[in-house]
Amino acid sequence: MNNLFETSKKARARPLGGFLRGLRALFNLALVLGLLAVVLVTGLYVFVANEYEPDLDRTYPELVQDSYIYDNQGEKIGEIPAVESRETVGPDGLGEHLPAAVVAIEDRRFYEHFGVDFKGLGRAAWTDLRAWEVKEGGSTISEQLMKNLYVPEDERLEISFGRRFFQSSLAFAYERNHTKEEVLTAYLNTVYFGKGAYGAEVAAQSYFGKSAKELTLSEAATLAGFLHAPSTYSTWEGEVVLGPATERRNRVLGLMKEQGMISAADYLEAKAAPLKFAAEPEPPDPAYGPFLEKVRREVEERLGAEALALGGLRIHTTLDTGLQRAAVETSDDVLFAPDDPSAAVVTVEPQSGAIRALAGQEGSFNLSLDARRQPGSSFKPIVLAAALRENVSPQSTYVSEELTFDFQRRSYVVANYDSVERGEISVAEAMAESDNTVFVQLAADVGLKDVVETAEALGITTPVEPFPSTAIGGLGTGVSPLDMASAYSTFAGGGIHREPYSVESVERVGYGQSETVYDHRIGGRRVLTGDQAAVANGVLRSVVEGGTASMFHDLDEEIGRPSAGKTGTTDDFVDAWYVGYTPNLCTSVWVGYPEGRRSLVGVHGLEEPNGETLPMDIWSAYMAEATEGDLALDFPEADASGLEVSVANGSSGL
């Protein structure tokens, strides 16, 4: 009997012992798997954190931003939009209400967790496990920030276990090195609010026409409510749907009251406030378009394409908006008919090189910068400058007559307009009368290579070739209106050429901080001596007083001060120019058809639409307005005692 009992006890003990051993084995397996999981998770976390460590260590993330452009008085005239329209601000720029509203609706335990809300994550994980797929995001503000920074936009709606771990690891690592204020500031500068607005500042401007720091409680709650699904609250045309927006705002306000962020009185007052959204902003003023393109190119040249793409630049320019508008309006007043040609107007300040106006655009084509047109006789002052550099006096004489000569195995004939032959005349007289034959002879005597070098020194940036036709503006490539204003400004600037520029300074801003990254320094190179420049001014002054520029205009009377300049017309009246200047401002005007060699004949009934007509009509009316209020300064007296007077003797070799 006892043996039976003992046998029965042993029989019962064996299954119990086996169960315990199995349980212990399962526990050990679970422990090993748990340790492996911890090692794996820790390793993956360390890998993710180290991979993104340089970015995670920054106080705030580097984000693309819009760049703004200002005139010479500090008024905003345009912008260079970034891929994501944004203007970052620091904590002080977010205002009192918006950060609290966002925490209330997006992450109520924001100030309690360390980047990952384990309570929320556990709830989401349990839901996911039951469904055996990822159903809930369980994201904190920190995790959303990591998603916005490191997940491509087209992948952000995809949710997976791996994605959640990736975001959670980054969020936890980010919060180790950042305060809650820094996390929230970074998030509010990163997140999309709808209507093309990234970040709180641009969103506040877009929806309410004010800065984020100026938002009322009602407005801040509205913006916070848009974050979960921005497109829900706007139409395709960008208009806010008032009903859903109001309901969402009230939901945010209720959560703020529930979480003790605002009082019941604040809640009722904000809930009762009607929502008033800002009107769509005015489109950019097309009058500034050509100048803004010059600014964009100059910034890219100075700072590089990458800096321009990153943005956040505050670009202060040389533009005088009064002159810019006057240039556009005067051109439109003179060329008013639908089939009229186009005009380009460029004004440069000779003493600095600052571009004060740059107008002229046909569609997307910038006429002032990119048009390359033949200058005709407006190129002759460059030949004069080359002669002055060789100490040739403008009182030197040549015989004005039709020329036949051989050049590079080809025969050429040069004649004056209407085949006029003036006999023996001085270079100064030839300039006033715009005599072609004299200037071809002068260029040959001075040296065609010297003419080319002088053109480059004066600021002509397109290729100029050493051909006889160059002397009378027959160039291979042509010149731009900006180049012509640049060249003539050297005469007005006392012989010193200063490169024309549009950008005074550039600041880079971000999160309420700024630094100067470019500051223009005025410089120049001497091309002519002061006396040589004064002599050139005297010769070009005679064009205004009694030469071609006086045929239909009395410029001294019309603009109320002395000026100097030169007309220019090309074959078949295709291009017409007037480039002139006072001691303070130099302006070039070109008139023509952008599409090519289309004659100006017949425009406004003109049989001979040359530089003395349409371009001078624009120049005179524009400069009368541009110089109004300026002192009526005379040009410096010329001392030509160091120049040699020569008499034509047929030595030009033509």
Image (cartoon, rainbow, N blue to C red):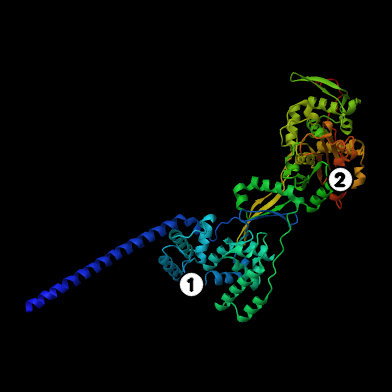
Q: Quadrant for the N terminus, please.
A: bottom left
Q: Quadrant for the C terminus, please.
A: top right
Q: CA distance from mark 1 to mark 2?
A: 70 Å
Which amino acid is tagged 2?
A: Val
Which element carries disc 1, helix, strand or loop? loop
Which element carries disc 2, helix, strand or loop? helix
Residue 61 appears at what percent x and percent y? Answer: 55, 58
Q: Which residue is mark 1?
A: 112
Is residue 437 something that shows in the picture? yes
Say left or right for 280 vs 147.
Answer: right
Is residue 89 something that shows in the picture? no
Classify 166 as above or below 549: below
Q: How many marks?
A: 2
Which is nearer the eye, 615 or 164? 164
Which is nearer the eye, 542 or 321? 321
Residue 172 appears at what percent x and percent y? Answer: 46, 64
Classify 225 as above or below 83: below
Classify 205 as above or below 404: below
Which is nearer the eye, 220 or 525? 220
User: Dot 2, crowdedness within 10 Å: few (<14), some or many (≥20)?
Assistant: some
Residue 111 appears at what percent x and percent y? Answer: 51, 71
Classify 188 as above or below 433: below
Q: Which residue is mark 2?
A: 334
Give the label on residue 179, or none. Answer: none
User: Dot 1, crowdedness within 10 Å: few (<14), some or many (≥20)?
Assistant: few
Residue drawn at 68 percent across, 59 percent down: 237
